[in-house]
Amino acid sequence: MTSEDKAMVLDARKDPMGWAIADYYKNGVAGRLRVFSSMFDEDEMSVESLFRTIEQMPEIERVALERASGHILDVGAGSGCHSLALQDMGKEVCAIDISPRSVEVMRESGVRDARLINMYDCALTEKFDTILMLMNGTGIVGTLDNMPAFFERIGQLLADGGQVLVDSSDLIYLYENEDGSVDIDLNGRYYGEVDFQMQYKNMKGEGFDWLYVDFDTLAHYAEESGFAAELVAQGAHYDYLARLARR
């Protein structure tokens, strides 16, 4: 993937999640947001859950919002639920997303600084005290091969003393046997690298890579890039919140 590819935003004609978000915001209901993968059976994403209030958010997300401070960048903000919660807490937040319809919804729903931009876009030159990446925030990294570029970019965006608060899940549980052994091809691709494609009504988006990463692997790549990773909180099902900061 070239730097130009990484900095792209979505074509509004191929933005199924954005249109689902817009329908739900306008009508209080949306159709099925279907999720396909070569690795799993067809699934469906709850559009309603993308509009959750802070009271409805899992503990990991509430901890992240409490810990977010200073000038905050909400990456992949979607419907803007986290940015709105931060604003209600009196915090300053810039919400970004590559989905045109999602950004429109954020602006209409009251997110004061919502931008249609990719975090890798060199036009984003501000420095942030907190970079917030929730709802499996490591997903946008795509694959482990992209980790060095990811850490280089957050290093450019972070102010001195800044932090990244990011959540993810360890998919190892999908490969565990009843006796505790694990069926993983150690010579194959990393088990947390997943490919997805979404469809809403008759609109199908482009396929994309999405990364679920265990904490130890995240910490390894962080160290190689001059960052330290701290395990802040753990959820009930292999999910966790990590804090990344320059060493």
Image (spheres, rainbow, N blue to C red):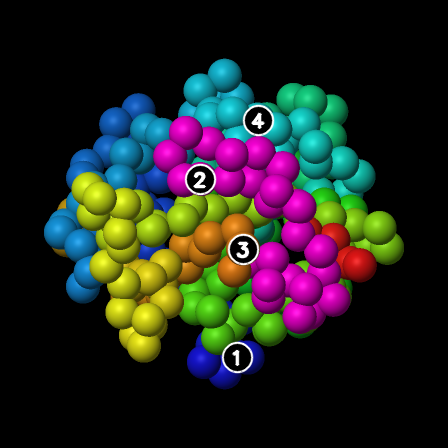
Q: Sequence order check: which comes first, mark 3 or mark 2?
A: 3
Residue 238 spot, x, y in % from top left? 41, 40
Give the spatial CA distance, label 1 vs label 3.
Answer: 30 Å
Looking at the image, is 76 positioned above or below residue 112? below
Q: Closest to the observer: 83 or 36?
A: 36
Tell me the residue at 59%/63% (across/down): 220
Q: Which residue is mark 3?
A: 216
Marked residue nearer the N-terminal end (2 or 4) = 4
Q: Amino acid at mark 3?
A: Asp
List the residue tagged with mark 2.
239
Within 10 Å of disc 2 (Cα), the crowding (few <14, some 14-19, many 20+) is some
Region in magenta? 218-243
Q: Position of residue 233 (x, y in %)?
A: 57, 34
Name which residue lies at 46% across and 26% down. 58
Residue found 51% across the figure and 72% down from its top: 146
Q: Which mark is residue 4?
A: 1
Label 4 Cα crowd, 10 Å radius (few <14 / some 14-19 / many 20+): some
Which residue corresponds to mark 4? 62
Q: Residue at x 22, y 44 (%)?
A: 179
Q: Is residue 232 left or right of residue 126?
A: left
Residue 84 belongs to magenta span:
no
Question: Disc 2 and disc 4: Cα gap in Å?
Answer: 14 Å
